[in-house]
Image (cartoon, grey):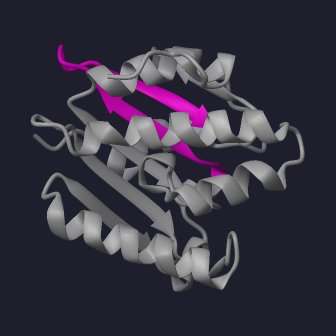
Amino acid sequence: MIGPGPVMPWFRHWVVVEQEATGIRCFQLSVIPGLLQTEGYARALLVSGGLLTADQVEQQVAARLARQEILTRPDPPLFTAVIDERVLHQPVGGAEAMRDQLRHIVKLCAEQPRVRIQIVPTSAGAYAGLNGPFVIATLPDGDDVVYLDDQLQGRFIERAEDVKPSRSSGTRSVVRRCPISSRSR
């Protein structure tokens, strides 16, 4: 189990939640979810922002890869990722890095029965997830907590009433009505 160490300060609490979760359901609109990223893909993402020093990038890559251990531990959470098809066509890190990334996902799904990936086809048009990426973690007591994600920071939501959607955002409806947010036990 990793501690909150080198991850971004605003993300530390979520890392603890991930470690404790019995289920993790995520939706990603623009990138491969962090728990599925290869080293090359993660590095390319972190470098692209231009906000981190080379040392900080390496620390973040190492922390991201260490977090992935929860998927292969003896009692892993049920992990379901819903990914927009466009993510699979975006050559993050170049063609070779993307090929490695896609192979990694296929291998992980084949070897880890509690890892499930669903792809939303581009032909789906508009759907609730277009409002932005999020992760829902189910804790051992059965409570769900949500992490609303973006590249610069994230927001940790423990109660539905803490979600304050703007007029242009349907975040509350995504959290309550998106198919991956309903428990299937």
As drawn, 92 above or below 9: below
Q: Is residue 71 left or right of residue 38?
A: left
Q: Residue 81: percent from the left, percent from the top? A: 38, 55
User: Is residue 22 within the magenta segment?
Assistant: no
Picture quarter with the C terminus? top left
Most extreme residue toward the right, as rendered?
Answer: 50
Seen at 52% across and 40% down, the residue is 64
User: What residue is rendered at 56% in x and 81% in y?
Assistant: 122
Query: Residue, x 26% and y 60% (percent of image)?
Result: 116
Name the residue located 78 percent from the left edge and 44 percent from the top edge: 168
Decide which of 114, 126 is in the foreground and name it. 114
Residue 51: image location, x then y, percent: 88, 39
Nearer to the camera, 31 or 174 = 31
Q: Does 158 appear above or below 80?
A: above
* Front residue of this view, candidates 110 and 152: 110
Quadrant of the snapshot with the N terminus: top left
- Asked whether residue 172 appears in the rendered view, the answer is no
> Is residue 137 located in the magenta-colored stretch of the structure?
yes
Looking at the rendering, the stretch of residues picked out in magenta corresponds to: 131-149
Q: Is residue 138 above or below residue 140?
A: below
Horizontally, residue 2 falls left or right of residue 79, namely: right
How many numbered marks have been drawn onto this rendered protein structure? 0
Where does residue 91 sit, x and y in percent of width and height? 67, 78
Residue 64 in view in this figure: yes
